[in-house]
Image (cartoon, helix red, strand yellow):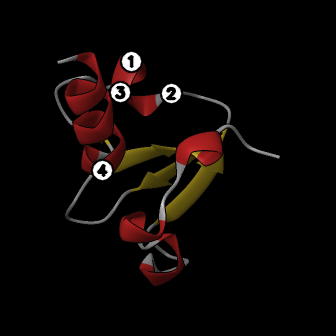
Amino acid sequence: MAKFIVNTGPNKEVHRTLFTKPACKIQEISSSNRLDTDTDYTVLYPTIYDGCRHVIQKNIVSKN
């Protein structure tokens, strides 16, 4: 199983497979815009790809 699901469409989001939530709407990413990989695109291409906002928001709220 891949560690990351990359939305290569207009959103340019990276989802960690272990932390996906229903709000991520992974099933709505078209097969032409979805890449399942073990490479973290937020590290490889930090100016292009962002982490999933649903997971990031949860982590920020839990730290405060």
Residue 49 is at least partly visible in this image = no
Q: Position of residue 1 (x, y in %)?
A: 83, 46
Label 1 residue SS: helix
> Contact, CB < 8 Å: mark 1 with mark 2?
yes
- Which quarter of the figure is the C terminus placed in? top left
Q: Position of residue 2 (x, y in %)?
A: 74, 43
> Contact, CB < 8 Å: mark 3 with mark 1?
yes
Q: Residue at x 44, y 82 (%)?
A: 28
Q: Position of residue 14 (x, y in %)?
A: 41, 44
Relative to 47, is 59 on the left or the right? right
> What residue is shown with label 2?
40
Relative to 60, is 59 on the left or the right? right
Other-residue count near label 2 (Cα within 10 Å), few / some / many at <14 / 14–19 / ≥20 = some
Distance, label 2 to label 4, CA atoms, is: 17 Å
The answer to whether residue 13 is above or below residue 48 is: below
Distance, label 3 to label 4, CA atoms, is: 15 Å
Q: Which mark is residue 54?
A: 4
Other-residue count near label 3 (Cα within 10 Å), few / some / many at <14 / 14–19 / ≥20 = some
Label 3 residue SS: helix
Q: Residue at x 30, y 38 (%)?
A: 58
Q: Quadrant of residue 3?
A: top right
Q: Amino acid at mark 4?
A: His
Relative to 57, is 51 on the left or the right? right
Other-residue count near label 4 (Cα within 10 Å), few / some / many at <14 / 14–19 / ≥20 = some
> What residue is shown with label 3?
42
**Residue closest to the eye, 18 or 63:** 63
> Contact, CB < 8 Å: mark 3 with mark 2?
yes
Residue 35 is at least partly visible in this image = yes
> Contact, CB < 8 Å: mark 2 with mark 4?
no
Q: Residue at x 20, y 36 (%)?
A: 48
